[in-house]
Amino acid sequence: MASIRNLKKDLTYLVNEVISDAYVALYFQPAEQRDAIFEIVNQAAELNNTLLDRINRPAEKHNASLVRKHYAQVRREMTEGVERLFGELSRVCQASQKK
């Protein structure tokens, strides 16, 4: 089982990648897209805070099987959330190129 420390590092790294890509996109996208990009940054910060809270407070501490399932679920939600955010950022950037 991966350590909690590594899970937190992975979460922080992935969320920071989304945020840094969003800020780079701000320089290349028109001003109309700013609000949509900032909304993606806010969603990334919310994902980070929510998942960090769940990592720090597992539901059942005394049952190892449930703890493993809890952290596996957190990891799945982390990857799905980050993929969703990158997809939204990509859609915002593509929408501005079609105009």
Image (spheres, helix red, strand yellow):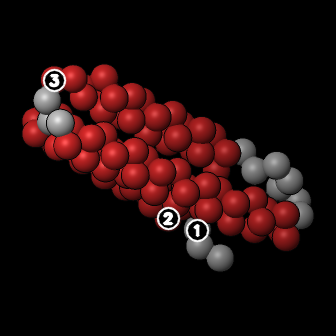
Mark 3 element type: helix
Q: Residues within 10 Å of mark 2 (few under 14, many from 20)?
A: few
Residue 20 makes an appearance in the image? no
- Depth order, front residue of 99/66: 99
Cα gap from disc 2 to disc 3, whole angstroms = 37 Å
Q: Which mark is residue 6?
A: 2
Q: Which residue is mark 1?
A: 3
5 displayed left or right of 22: right
Based on the displayed image, in which of its 4 quarters is residue 66 positioned?
A: bottom right
Rendered location of residue 48, percent (x, y)? 50, 42
Residue extending farthest left = 27
Mark 1 element type: loop
Cα gap from disc 3 to disc 1, whole angstroms = 42 Å
The mark nearer the N terminus, 3 or 1, is 1
Rendered location of residue 93, percent (x, y)? 24, 43
38 displayed left or right of 80: left
